[in-house]
Amino acid sequence: EVQLLESGGGLVQPGGSLRLSCAASGFTFSSYAMTWVRQAPGKGLEWVSSISGSGDNTYYADSVKGRFTISRDISKNTLHLQMNSLRAEDTAKYYCAKVRSEVVAAASNYWGQGILVTVSS
Amino acid sequence: DIQMTQSPSSLSASVGDRVTITCRASQGISNYLAWYQQKPGKVPKLLIYGASTLQSGVPSRFSGSGSGTDFTLTISSLQPEDVATYYCQKYNSAPLTFGGGTKVEIK
């Protein structure tokens, strides 16, 4: 059974940093791309970042480029999202999702429960 | 960047009705389109990928069609458990943009 468990969220001041993690199990982690999607309170889904199965290719939304870094630790079956220079508009629930393919150009077929990030002073 | 526009933004229909949601891409994306269902307070769930391929376990009353720039999600007979917000997503290349969502309610 595929399981994705996010951690690392919480309250942070504007300009601060957080590192989200997503522990994956139930599938061969290195064979699938992974993605982060966020949802601000009462709003729609927003794609944030994706990484290929090998970790060689990474992609970012313009809204986070230069501030967020996606990475994966294949030895620990864990996906990370390092978030720096956080802004109030980054406040959202962040979902980790498994992609159907090794490349990011595929749909996300499994989603974690999400983790809340609140940026506020 | 390619924009994804869904319509309508919300709809209300009766149980048993046929419901159609449209998603339009500002440029052609072949069939690199997925549909997701998000029930209130729940995690998004993949319904359809490749514009028309039903994800395993999804009821057959859901179907998708289209290619290029215009896509539709159809619920052939709306059920109470289909109350949700539906999102399209393009995935041919980054950014993997979502549509704005369509909220489906029961009349």
Image (cartoon, grey):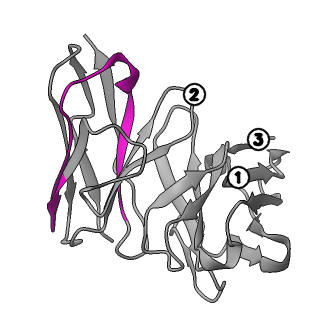
Name the mark on residue A3.
1
Nearer to us of marks 1 and 2 is: 1
Q: Amino acid at mark 1?
A: Gln
Q: Is residue B26 left or right of residue A3?
A: left
Q: Nearer the viewer, mark 3 or mark 1?
A: 1
Query: What quarter of the picture does the C terminus of chain A occupy?
Result: top right
Q: Which mark is residue A66?
A: none
Q: Residues within 10 Å of mark 1 (few under 14, many from 20)?
A: some
User: Does residue A116 appear to the left or right of A52 in the view shown?
Assistant: right
When asked about the image quadrant of residue B57, the answer is top left
Q: Main secondary structure of the magenta part?
A: strand
Name the residue tied to disc 2: B41
Q: Position of residue A88 (x, y in %)?
A: 67, 46
Given this view, does label 3 or label 2 mark the residue nearer the observer? 2
Question: From mark 1 to mark 2, how far is it between C-alphas?
Answer: 19 Å
Q: Which of these two is toward me, B78 or B97?
A: B78
| Label 2 neighbour load within 10 Å: few <14, some 14-19, many 20+ | few
- Secondary structure category for the residue under label 1: strand
Q: What residue is drawn where x is 51% and y is 26%?
A: B40
Place of residue A72 in the rendered image (x, y in percent of width and height, measured from the top left)? 74, 75
Tell me how far mark 3 sits from mark 1, CA to CA: 30 Å
Q: Amino acid at mark 2?
A: Gly
